[in-house]
Amino acid sequence: MAWISTSLNTETVTFKDIGYSTTDATQAEIDFQVTKDPATGVKCAVKALDSKFAVVGWKVVDIGPNPADATADGGRTTVHRAVVRTESLSVSGVVDSCWIPDADK
């Protein structure tokens, strides 16, 4: 019997919505945290939604590497704020996804 694990070599990134605020009908601010390897850069897509859950703003945010001593957990979890332009008044803002970009692209 053999045990094979690929998870040891697989880098992961997780995210958590913290909050949002609507400045006016043209802008929203989305606060979120990202947990990743401190040496890895990631991209996160954030979106602002209206009262009918339609997307009224969208932005991809680059989150670069950070020092291992940047936070209490060794630099793994950091907090970010994205300012998103909107086409109409938003009532919420969330992270849609985060990923580690391909090095070749």
Image (cartoon, helix red, strand yellow):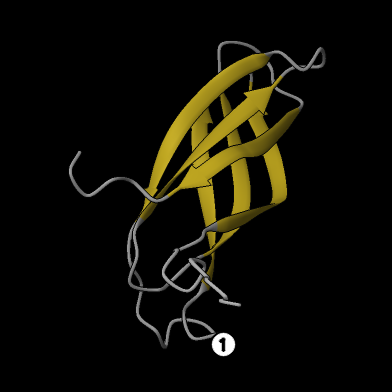
- The residue that label 1 is drawn on is 72
Q: Is residue 53 visible?
A: yes
Instruction: Count residues near mark 1 (Cα–Cα under 10 Å), then give few for <14, some for 14-19, many for 20+.
Output: few
Residue at image x 52%, y 56%? 80
Query: 68 left or right of 55?
Result: left
* Number of disc labels: 1
User: SS class of the residue under badge 1?
Assistant: loop
Type of amino acid under label 1: Ala
Quadrant of the drawing holding the C terminus: top left
Q: Residue furthest front?
A: 1
Quadrant of the drawing holding the N terminus: bottom right
x, y percent for residue 85: 50, 24
Residue at image x 53%, y 50%? 81
Query: 91 left or right of 5?
Result: right
x, y percent for residue 46: 55, 35
Residue 64 found in image quarter: bottom left
Looking at the image, residue 54 lies above or below residue 23? above
Looking at the image, residue 46 lies above or below residue 8? above
